Structure formats: C-alpha cells, structure tokens
Image (spheres, helix red, strand yellow):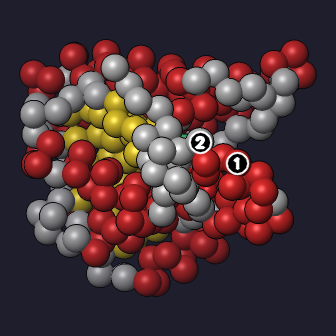
Amino acid sequence: MKDHTAIVTGGAAGIGHAITTELARRGTRVLAVDIDAEAGKALAAMDPDRIAFMEGDISKEEVARAAVARAVSTFGKLTGLVNNAHASRQKPLLELAPDDWALSFDTGFRGTLNFMKAAHPELLKTEGAIVNFGSGAALNGQPNQAAYAAAKEAIRGLSRVAANEWATDGIRINVVCPLALTEGVAKWKEAHPDQYDEIAAKVPLGRLGDPQKDIAPVVAFLLSDDSRYMTGQTLMADGGGTMLR
Ligand SMILES: NC(=O)c1ccc[n+]([C@@H]2O[C@H](COP(=O)([O-])OP(=O)(O)OC[C@H]3O[C@@H](n4cnc5c(N)ncnc54)[C@H](O)[C@@H]3O)[C@@H](O)[C@H]2O)c1
C-alpha cells in the first residue's frame, strides 16, 4: 500500500496504534491524531518516514480540518481515513448524566462526522476510502453501554447514508466492529483471568483478537483496492462473536 496515505484517529494507543503501525509496515504514510501527546510522539518516533503525529481532540471540528490540511501538506494527498477514537463511560442507563452522553457522542459520532466532512474534498480527488468503528456491544445491546451503543449505531447509520451519497464520488465507507485484547484489556485480564475465560469462551474462535494481527489487517483491506467493490458494509472482526445476516 505504498501509494496510500491515511489519517488514523486515536492512533496513540490500542487498536489505533496497531492500525497505524500495520499500515506503515505496508508502506502507507499515516497521520495519527490523538489527545495523548506523549504516546503519540513515541509512536511517530518508531517510523518517522511513514508516521506523523498531531495532538488534538477529535471532537472539535477545527482539529479535523487541521488534520486533513496537515496530512495533505505532509504527504501530498489523502487516500484513507480511519475514525477509530471513541471515549465513553459505562453505567446503567438511568445513571448516565448529560456529560456522559456528550462524551460518547462528541468523540464517537461527532468526531467521525467532523473527520468525514473535512476529508471529503481530498478523498474526492483520490477516490479514497473511509473506515468507521462500530461495536458488538451496540449490536447486541450490552448492559451499561447505552451512551456508547447509541453513538456506535449512529455511526453505522451515518456510514450507510454516506456510502450511498458518496458512491458517485468514488468514496467508499465501511464499518469494522472489533474485539481485541488491547493493553487496557490485557491488564484487566491479568487481574480477572476467570472473567476473561468466560468472555473468551463465548467467542467461537476462543479468544479476543490481537490488535495488530487480527484487526489492523481488516482495516488495511478496507482501505486498499482489494475491497474496491465494497461499501456501506459492517465487518465483524470479533472471532465470530456476532454473526450478521
Ligand atoms: N477493544 C475492543 O475490544 C473494542 C470492541 C468494540 C469496539 N471497539 C472500538 O474500537 C476503537 C478503538 O478501541 P480501543 O479499545 O483501541 O480504544 P482505546 O481506549 O484503547 O484507545 C483509544 C485512543 O483514542 C484516544 N482518544 C480518546 N479520546 C480522544 C479524543 N477526544 N481525541 C483524540 N483522541 C482520543 C485515546 O487517547 C487512545 O489513544 C473504538 O472505536 C472502540 O469503541 C473496541
């Protein structure tokens, strides 16, 4: 994917970190955008020729516009956008306060929308691709996830409409729902091995995914020409945990 360039939101940690480094390994030049400046700078230092970092809160429209301008000035063009970042708090539905709803919708839904709008003019020039993030927790209505699940399903609805509206622009939009053993989840697994085993046992493939080996390649596929006939789709990268029909 040497001719590709991409923006990855939330690239400093977890799945976003894996996507950024995996895309770079495949030759793509990537701008990672994250609020965590220390981790972001360490990420860029891993491969300065291919990875650039911009500190910013993705819920702000001006950050989205600045990121697209930075990607184009650094790489000359933009062919891909990965809307990975999403912050939320888990609580029972009746306990969710307005700021809990705002956090999930501002970072998840608004962040995704802001970056899609900001990137559209550049992706139009390159017939580029967008990958947005959903979640099995939203598809299955997992308890304590109301603010998160509602924002995730709003992202899927937005993605399907954009896939139809922007198809004639040559821009494809797909959604990935991952299940991954990130650094955060790995710490939790060490503290609660029995609970981890219980969750893993419900996954047909018997384990949570590896961000680098199991999730990032699916995102790379959706950004690449190998998926040129796919748009508006939701792909479950979750070991078979949810089987869409
Ligand atoms: N980990 C899983 O198993 C899982 C399951 C389903 C869906 N997802 C989705 O996959 C995506 C990545 O998940 P993860 O587990 O790697 O997340 P994570 O929490 O480990 O990492 C998120 C990154 O986003 C950054 N971030 C948070 N708020 C930000 C903001 N306002 N502006 C800029 N950056 C911000 C964080 O600093 C961090 O680097 C998310 O959309 C998440 O909802 C993950």
Tell me if I can see residue 57 in this picture.
no
Residue at 42% in and 24% down: 156
Tell me if I can see residue 233 in this picture.
yes
201 vs 151: above or below: below
Quadrant in which the N terminus is drawn: bottom left
Residue 14 spot, x, y in % from top left:
56, 61
Frontmost residue, 35 versus 237: 237
* Label annotation for residue 132: none
* 228 relative to 9 in the view: left or right: left
139 vs 35: above or below: above
Kind of residue sitting beneath label 2: Lys
Kind of residue sitting beneath label 1: Glu
Frontmost residue, 97 versus 18: 18
231 vs 26: above or below: above
How many angstroms separate mark 2 from mark 1 (CA)? 7 Å
Residue 100 spot, x, y in % from top left:
78, 29
* 153 relative to 216 in the view: left or right: right
* Label annotation for residue 202: 2
Verify CB contact (< 8 Å) between mark 2 and mark 1.
yes
Residue named by callout 1: 198
Residue at 38% in and 65% down: 213
Residue at 76% in and 62% down: 193
* 46 relative to 129 in the view: left or right: right
* 220 relative to 224 in the view: left or right: right
